[in-house]
Image (cartoon, coloured by chain):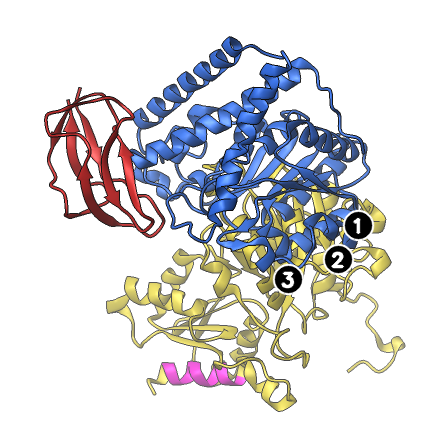
Chain colours: A yellow, B red, C blue
């Protein structure tokens, strides 16, 4: 632990937070394309550039016509984004918390996702919906849910989530380029987590997973904040002699089936980890595809690890135990390898 | 030219109905738009107009329940 | 606001022609359903033809329209071609949406018909987005959101009017008050004495107008459209009218007051305007009959075209879900 300024290395590697990476992606996108817009509650600088400052500086730099603070009106926010996008604008709408998407479900599910199809391809909705969530900040049962499974289940929507600063930048830029409605899920408690500085213009293709670490005993598939818990489980796995191949999905819908299946056909075991509740979650979809395609080649059943089937509790020890942790992930992976 | 006389769907929840009366005799001539048969729907008794002009050949007897889309007769 | 009691002949005849088209199209729609030629849920607008006919006489092709499932009259008045309409409601590949949207999702951007929704109230938030786009593009296009009296009670109405007012969007909120929200009478669902009163809550002008009077409707629309074009912001128009049929065509409409309905049909605004044009010497019987005959032929052509058009192939099932997939 560095104690004072004098001891700080002179050539420290510059890092940025997730907030800064997302902010940079928005700024670079708005600079590159005058059609990119930002709207949401408190997003403009008179309102401090967002509750967590993610959109700070944007309205000052690009003007309040392109960066608009809205009333607390999720349906109106989404409708404004959809309407403008029908005419070729590229709105990035913020729904402050993922739980509030429930207020705008009609606009998202009945309109954004479906207008291209129902119009026979005449109109399209190239919007991005940015939304934050996650347990760990004591925000309780209505401010912490991961609902990616809801939106992944809607034909016409795309759903993505980054686990690190470089992917956050690259996925968001790809989402803004994308001709379809994309939901970009951010994690509130780790907004301030630091990571490498993304290259300007960096893109991460939607639908492409990343094998972050190669291994032979089992495949662990995960995404978003809890992917970092998977990485944190690796030392314990190494010590137990379990060689895990670790995949960051990055895109939930569409998801990179080819990469996951290639990995599991090599390792024979698959564990899917997500922060959302296990039941009816994204893990169920992945598990169904893996067991169908690789039935005879699996060494053990596909396992899923998510949160218990309950709302996120407020009380600290309960909340801390809610989402999968590195310790539980390691225990699960070891017992899968050992056949216990 | 032959035109089929179809049992229509009138009303949201209707999948079938009763053909209550033929308003033109079998073999009789009919003009397009002239009341051809009546059916019982969830609403009331509806008179259905003829889709074409010509001679009616009745295929379906009255008093029976028919699915929407059933060919009740032809007009030649 | 003083309604214009004098409209030029050309506009009056144009409004009549549109009204006649809408009336004839509705009659043909019900006939086609009755003879089993097309199976679809049909939400008849008969009785409400004046509103879009007079409104659209104030609009350009590049103004935008968002309407709802009872909005085929709105779309025809805005310029939706008959063949594309009929092929779509027949579910054929030559329809506006390749048959994949159907009557509740007709879309025709060339005439500004940007979205038709099956969800009550959802025309309004999207109309706001189109209005925002006009502000960004600095053009003077206006956006019209059509909806019914029932929709004035849904959350989207309140969110949309509030946002449009705060952002001063060039949107006209047009409420076609036909006294019934689905099966429920106005008095049993709506707390406002009149829907136009609600405008006060959003600090925008609210105007109740006889939506069955072409001149009054034209004048009210002209005012609202003019405000929007001049950058003065949104207006709420409450247009009083009546629906001659039930919520969905063929339903058991016993929930409608029989005497009230009979009286409204008796006072058919179509017949009244037609008679006015004749007695004022704006048109002769021969002229009007010719207009009506041409309309019937155009509808014949459209229906035949639609029924001869093929259904979309199975590959259309998963086409247009995404613009691009990995």
**Magenta highlight on residue A328:** yes
Highlighted magenta segment, given as a residue range? A327-336
Earlier in the chain: of badge 2 and badge 3, it is 2
In the rendered image, which residue does mark 1 sit on? C166
Q: Are marks 1 and 2 in contact (CB under 8 Å)?
A: yes
Query: Given the current orientation, which residue lies at the most extreme right position?
Result: A6
Residue A49, position as x, y percentages in the image: 80, 59
Give the mark count. Answer: 3
Q: CA distance from mark 1 to mark 2?
A: 9 Å
In the rendered image, which residue does mark 2 sit on? A71
In the picture, residue B29 is in which quadrant? top left
Nearest the eye: C212 or C43:
C212
Crowd band around label 3 with a 10 angstrom C-alpha radius: few (<14), some (14–19), many (20+): many
In the rendered image, which residue does mark 3 sit on? A131
Residue C134, position as x, y percentages in the image: 72, 35
Above or below residue C291? Residue C64 is below
The structure residue drawn at horizontal position 78% and vertical position 40%, both measured from the top left corner, is C233
Nearest the eye: A18 or A35:
A35
Observer-side mark, 3 or 1, equals 1
- The kind of secondary structure element at disc 1 is helix
| Same-subunit check for callouts 2 and 3 | yes
Left/right of residue A104 with respect to residue C223 in the rendered view: left
- The kind of secondary structure element at disc 3 is strand
Crowd band around label 1 with a 10 angstrom C-alpha radius: few (<14), some (14–19), many (20+): some
The structure residue drawn at horizontal position 76% and vertical position 45%, both measured from the top left corner, is A66
Crowd band around label 2 with a 10 angstrom C-alpha radius: few (<14), some (14–19), many (20+): some
Left/right of residue C277 with respect to residue B18 in the rendered view: right
Which chain is home to disc 3? A
The structure residue drawn at horizontal position 61% and vertical position 34%, both measured from the top left corner, is C212
Residue A332, position as x, y percentages in the image: 43, 83
Which chain is home to disc 1? C
| Residue A149 makes an appearance in the image | yes
């Amino acid at each position: 632990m560095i104690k004072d300024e004098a001891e700080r290395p002179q050539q420290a590697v510059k890092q940025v937070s997730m907030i800064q990476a997302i902010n940079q992606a928005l700024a670079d996108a708005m600079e590159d394309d005058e059609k990119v817009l930002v709207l949401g509650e408190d997003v403009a600088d008179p309102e401090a550039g967002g509750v967590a400052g993610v959109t700070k500086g944007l309205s000052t730099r690009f003007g309040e016509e392109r960066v608009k603070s809205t009333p607390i009106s999720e349906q109106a926010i989404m409708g404004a984004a959809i309407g403008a996008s029908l005419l070729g604008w590229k709105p990035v709408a913020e729904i402050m918390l993922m739980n509030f998407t429930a207020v705008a479900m009609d606009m998202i599910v009945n309109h954004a996702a479906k207008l291209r199809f129902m119009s026979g391809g005449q109109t399209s909705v190239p919007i991005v919906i940015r939304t934050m969530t996650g347990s760990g900040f004591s925000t309780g049962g209505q401010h912490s849910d991961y609902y990616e499974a809801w939106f992944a289940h809607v034909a016409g929507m795309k759903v993505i989530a980054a686990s690190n600063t470089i992917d956050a930048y690259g996925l968001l830029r790809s989402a803004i380029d994308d001709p379809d409605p994309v939901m970009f899920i951010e994690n509130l408690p780790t907004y301030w987590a630091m990571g490498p500085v993304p290259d300007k213009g960096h893109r991460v293709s939607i639908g492409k997973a990343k094998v972050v670490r190669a291994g032979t005993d089992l495949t662990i598939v995960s995404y978003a904040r809890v992917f970092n818990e998977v990485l944190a489980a690796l030392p314990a796995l190494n010590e137990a002699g379990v060689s895990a191949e670790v995949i960051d999905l990055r895109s939930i819908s569409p998801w990179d089936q080819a990469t996951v299946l290639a990995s599991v056909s090599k390792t024979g075991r698959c564990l899917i980890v997500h922060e959302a509740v296990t039941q009816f979650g994204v893990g169920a979809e992945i598990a169904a595809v893996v067991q169908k395609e690789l039935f005879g080649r699996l060494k053990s059943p596909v396992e899923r690890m998510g949160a218990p089937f309950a709302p996120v509790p407020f009380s600290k020890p309960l909340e801390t135990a809610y989402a999968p942790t590195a310790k539980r992930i390691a225990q699960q992976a070891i017992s899968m390898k050992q056949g216990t | 030219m032959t035109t089929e006389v179809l049992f229509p769907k009138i009303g949201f929840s209707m999948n079938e109905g009763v053909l209550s009366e033929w308003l033109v005799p079998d073999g009789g001539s009919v003009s397009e738009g002239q009341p051809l048969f009546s059916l019982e729907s969830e609403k009331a008794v509806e008179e259905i107009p003829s889709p074409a002009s010509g001679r009616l050949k009745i295929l379906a007897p009255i008093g029976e329940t028919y699915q929407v889309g059933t060919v009740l007769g032809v007009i030649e | 606001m003083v309604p214009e009691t004098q409209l030029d002949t050309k506009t009056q005849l144009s409004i009549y022609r549109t009204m006649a088209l809408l009336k004839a199209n509705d009659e043909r729609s019900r006939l086609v359903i009755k003879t089993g030629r097309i199976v679809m849920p049909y939400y008849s607008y008969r009785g409400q033809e004046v509103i879009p006919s007079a409104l659209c006489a104030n609009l350009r092709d590049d103004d935008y329209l968002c309407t709802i499932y009872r909005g085929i009259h709105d779309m025809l008045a805005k310029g939706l071609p008959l063949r594309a309409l009929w092929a779509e409601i027949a579910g054929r590949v030559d329809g506006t949406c390749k048959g994949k949207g159907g009557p509740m999702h007709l879309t025709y951007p060339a005439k500004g018909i940007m979205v038709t929704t099956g969800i009550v109230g959802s025309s309004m938030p999207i109309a706001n987005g189109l209005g925002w786009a006009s502000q960004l593009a600095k053009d003077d296009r206006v956006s019209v959101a059509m909806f019914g009296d029932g929709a004035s009670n849904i959350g989207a109405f309140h969110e949309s009017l509030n946002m449009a007012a705060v952002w001063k969007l060039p949107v006209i909120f047009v409420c076609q008050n036909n006294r019934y929200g689905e099966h429920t009478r106005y008095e049993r669902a709506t707390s406002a004495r009149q829907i136009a009163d609600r405008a006060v809550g959003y600090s925008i002008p609210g105007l109740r107008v006889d939506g069955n009077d072409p001149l009054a409707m034209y004048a009210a629309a002209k005012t609202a459209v003019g405000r929007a074009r001049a950058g003065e912001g949104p207006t709420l128009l409450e247009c009083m009218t009546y629906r001659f049929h039930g919520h969905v065509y063929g339903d058991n409409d016993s929930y409608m007051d029989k005497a009230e309905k009979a009286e409204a049909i008796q006072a058919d605004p179509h017949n009244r305007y037609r008679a006015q044009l004749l007695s004022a010497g704006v048109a002769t019987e021969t002229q009007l009959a010719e207009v009506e005959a041409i309309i019937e032929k155009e509808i014949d052509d459209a229906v035949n075209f639609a029924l001869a058009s093929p259904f979309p192939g199975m590959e259309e099932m998963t086409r247009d879900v995404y613009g691009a997939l990995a």
